[in-house]
Every structure is written in C-alpha cells, then in structure tokens.
Image (spheres, rainbow, N blue to C red):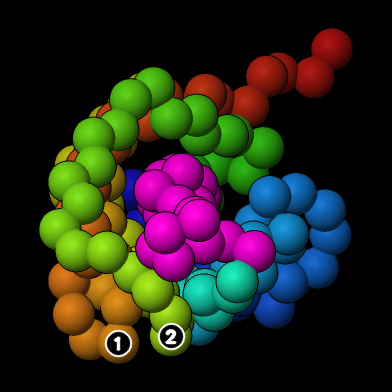
Amino acid sequence: MDFDPRIAEAMVATNSKGEGIHRWLGIEFTEFTAERLVAELEVRDELLTAFGNMHGGVVAAMVDHVLGCVLYPYMPRGAWAATTEFKLNYLAPVKGGRLVATSRVLSQTKRTAVISVEVTNEGRPVCVAQGTLLVQEPKPRD
C-alpha cells in the first residue's frame, strides 16, 4: 500500500480542529511521514489522579488515537480503520511535562494492520503498545 503524503499533511493541519476526545485531551500531530506518526500531549492537572500521576486511561486514549490515524495515508479514500484490540505496558508514572507518542505500521494487509506505539515523557519511556486494526474498504455507491 502506498503512502499518500497529502493525506498526512491534511491530518496534521486539521488535527487540532473539530470535536472529539483528541481535541479535549489536547493531542497534536507534530510529524507524519511514511515511517511514523508523532503526536504530543501536554500533561495538565485535570488529567492527573488524586495521587498526582497521569491517569492510565489518558495514555490509552492517546495510544488508541494514533493507532488508527497512522493508517489513513495508506488506505483508499473512504476506507476507515477500527481498533479491534491493543495491549499497553506502562513503564513509568507521568507527573508533568509532555507525552510524545510515536506510531508505526508493523504489518498491513487489505483487511487488517498491526501497529506499534512508543510513548515517552520528557525523553523517558513510559508506555509501549501494540494493536490490531480492522481496515474497512469504502462501500460502493449505488
């Protein structure tokens, strides 16, 4: 499958617009190439638990977002990707700073893809993840 840089550029340009959890969390795409998608998130007080650590669900939401988005420049126009499963390994707590998630396509067929994501906080690894996505082809128009 070929990478369409125009789709990647459009996704970077429009990611901070619109509605959705990515907008509420403040996830911003900072790099999108054929090799990887990089997204960043500023750690804010409202994303922390009562113990002062970022809630694991915030990291999971960020991972799920970049799992799917990394595929769009490889799919036919009108296709969509849905996460069917993903596994997270949390490596260290996050208390402040910025999260950086780097997503890569490990394998892709017409119907599925396997994606890896590494999340760092101020250069320190805090999470590694891998997920499987279902790729749904565009429906033919009647």
User: Residue visible at 71% across and 18% down?
Assistant: 140
Predominant SS along the magenta part: helix
Q: Quadrant of residue 64?
A: top left
Identity, as a three-letter code, of the amino acid under mark 2: Gly
Q: Quadrant of residue 130?
A: top left
- Horizontal and vertical percent position of residue 135: 45, 28
| Left or right: 78, with 49 as reference point | right
Residues shaded magenta: 46-67
- Horizontal and vertical percent position of residue 28: 59, 74
- Horizontal and vertical percent position of residue 5: 50, 72
Q: Furthest residue to the front?
A: 51
Quick one: label 1 or label 2, which is nearer the N terminus? 2
Mark 2: secondary structure: loop
Mark 1: secondary structure: loop
64 vs 10, nearest the viewer: 64
Q: Is residue 65 magenta?
A: yes
| Left or right: 86, with 37 as reference point | left
User: Residue visible at 49% across and 55% down?
Assistant: 49
Task: Please say if the residues under marks 1 and 2 sit with CB atoms less than 8 Å apart.
Answer: yes
25 vs 95, nearest the viewer: 95
Residue at numbered disc 2: 97
Q: Is residue 19 magenta?
A: no
User: Residue visible at 17% across and 71% down?
Assistant: 125
Q: Quadrant of residue 14?
A: bottom right
For marks 1 and 2, give the CA distance: 6 Å
Above or below 59: residue 136: above
- Horizontal and vertical percent position of residue 60: 41, 46
Identity, as a three-letter code, of the amino acid under mark 1: Glu
Residue at numbered disc 1: 122
